[in-house]
Amino acid sequence: MAVYKGISEIIQVLSNKHRFIIISYLHIHKTREGAVSKIMNNKNGNAIKKHESISYSIIKIISLATVAILLNQTPVLANDAGVPVSEGGEGRSVLDWPVGVTKYIPLKSFKGYTLWCSMAGDGTVNLMDMKGNIVHTWKNETAPGLYGELLDNGNLLYSGRTRVGYGSPRNHPMSGKGGVLWEKDWNNNVVAKIINDAAHHDQAKLPNGNYLQIAWDPVPKGMEERIPGGIYHTEHKDGMIFEELITETTPRGERIWEWRPSDHLNPEEYPICPLNDRKEWLHANSVEYLPKGNPITDTESVMVSLRHNSICIIFEKATGEVQWRYGGCMDGEWGKLGAQHDFSMIKEGLPGYGNVMIFDNGMNLASVRESGLYWGIAHSRVLEIDPKTKKVVWTYDYQDKNWNFPIKTKWLFNSPYIAGAQRLPNGNTLICEGGTGRIFEVTKENEIVWEFVNPDRKAIYRAYRYGPDFIGFNGKNLPGTN
């Protein structure tokens, strides 16, 4: 009854239109019952699974009420006068946002060139100077699946989207589909092309010249029932649940190594978040290679972000065994992450070398965090974590210090999906607020010193800044960085 009382209190702050929607939803679904896997911790801190017969509708109603609260407010983004998003100009919709470079403080920014592309674009990848001028482009044959990055040789590594294979509309549709990986030189000539219609989300080039990719594959038959969590009866229509393969492929397309989670991970320790569907067990969305001698594991290892479980792991490439883990539901960690993206190590030579960075999207969370009580309302953060202590040593997130539920809040930073962050040589951090198509640079003190909004008004999966001395620019005729 306490849950219903809480819903009632939420409904009271809504407009008549939103109140009608929620009450109607409650009436339609009041008799629907489902077995929801609830993950709890016993006294010894070990994760156990407990099935409770509860109304799944309650969870959905709370989520809808939260959305309605957000819809009931005026987003504080940019006004008709063109005040930058970061300065809190008020606007009625994203169409009021100014586009291009909206803020630039040269003395505080790291000058360089920013690489980005629109997720739903035509495959054009843009290299842009600090004032928003496009200085170089690559034209690709397909829409992104999902982004591009520059290699040290100056080539572009770009994943494109195919229309067949796993993840496509007619073959077990799932989000983040790729399918074809290109490496292209500065003049857009193809250096390598690898077709794997099951590939999705992310990739990396290895020091030996091979490529690391994420690909979908069904979990072994009979394992479906061993995977806890998720929304009851939301597997694919044929009952399939997918896991990942992390693969190493040569430039000629020969697969020479793979890692299969079901061979190494105990499903009981990697439950699906109760608000996610069961079409995928893990939903890996980023992968990064760590060479032997790295400061985290000292061995050749692989970093992977698992969105559906809100877990980041590092495993040893030779054995496949997990060496490091953060988040999820084990050892009291449930609630530390919310459907995160872009799990990476800060590179050598940069401030914070050896620490890990995570774009925490903040979805599906209702917990007390270091920065305060949020009542499950989604908000994003960028985290820098010391891997030895697992302590957060730096955070960027926006919160209105004067906000007191249910009074309207200023919503200046939130991407419920995609997005990423990159540490820069001057100690600043470049943040891609993916869902809004906004890229901005912040200082260690969280001051925004550069900001860009995609003129296409489309999402951007990830973005990177490269300094004028980037080795890949040697011999390239680029204009000054302004």
Image (cartoon, grey):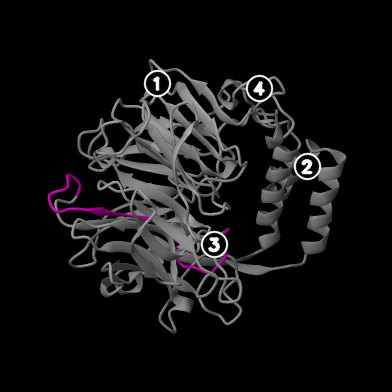
Decide which of 12, 177 is in the foreground and name it.
177
Q: Using the image, tell me which numbered label, if any, was put on residue 384.
A: none
Answer yes or no: do the residues labelled 1 and 4 have beta carbons within 8 Å?
A: no
Q: Quadrant of residue 261?
A: bottom left
User: Label 4: few (<14), some or many (≥20) within 10 Å?
Assistant: some
Q: Quadrant of residue 269?
A: bottom left
Precedes in sequence: disc 1 or disc 2: 2
Left or right of residue 93: residue 167: left
The Cα–Cα distance between marks 2 and 3, rounded to whole angstroms, is 32 Å
Magenta residues, start to end: 275-296
Residue 121 position within the rendered picture, expressed as x and y whole percent measured from the top left: 57, 51
Q: Using the image, tell me which numbered label, if any, was put on residue 11.
A: 2
Going by the numbered disc 3, the residue's amino acid type is: Ser
The Cα–Cα distance between marks 3 and 1, rounded to whole angstroms, is 35 Å
Q: Residue at x 38, y 60 (%)?
A: 182
- Determine whether the residue tagged by mark 4 lies in a helix, strand or loop: loop
Is residue 287 magenta-colored? yes
Q: Which residue is mark 4?
A: 82
Q: Is residue 241 visible?
A: yes
Going by the numbered disc 4, the residue's amino acid type is: Gly
Q: Which residue is mark 3?
A: 175
Going by the numbered disc 2, the residue's amino acid type is: Ile
Q: Is residue 46 visible?
A: no
Q: Which residue is mark 1?
A: 445
Q: Residue at x 78, y 42 (%)?
A: 11
User: Label 1: few (<14), some or many (≥20) within 10 Å?
Assistant: few
